[in-house]
Amino acid sequence: MKIVLTGSLGNIGRPLTENLVKDGFDVTVISSNPERQNTIESLGAKAATGSIYDAGFLTETFLSMYPSSSCALWDFISTSSPL
């Protein structure tokens, strides 16, 4: 299972990341600080660096968890939707 965590490596995020990775989950950790990338990756997780206020970054991060066919569908929906 793939999981995305926000909050980076705080008091909850770090042990949660460690436990999820240990249990076999594919974990991506969102951090606004590029200096945390090495630490995140040393825990066995993927680092996604960007702002939680950046809708494009979040969309890309969450869609990267789905097969490419889902991404193609999202591209179609997002360009066709009046939203």
Image (cartoon, grey):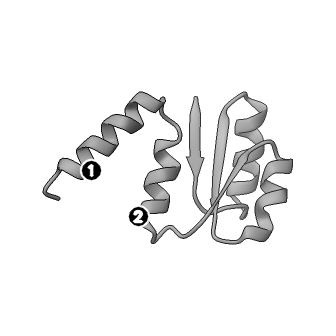
Residue 33: % across, % down: 70, 72
Given the current orientation, which residue lies at the most extreme left position?
A: 82
Residue in the picture at 48% in, 52% down: 60
Q: Which residue is mark 1?
A: 78
- On residue 46, the disc is none
Tell me residue 42's x, y (percent): 86, 49
Quadrant of the rendered structure where residue 49 is?
bottom right
Residue at 27% from the left image edge and 42% from the top image edge: 76
33 in relation to 28, above or below:
below
Q: Is residue 57 left or right of residue 25?
A: left
Residue identified by numbered label 2: 55
Tell me the element at label 2. Answer: helix
Q: Amino acid at mark 1?
A: Ser
The crowd level at tag 2 (other Cα within 10 Å; few <14, some 14-19, many 20+) is: few
Q: Relative to residue 26, is residue 83 depicted above or below?
A: below
Report the side of 46 relative to 80 (left or right): right
Helix, strand or loop under label 1: helix
How far is the residue under mark 1 from the one under mark 2? 12 Å
* Camera-nearest residue between 56 and 33: 56
Q: Amino acid at mark 2?
A: Ala
The mark closer to the camera, 1 or 2, is: 1
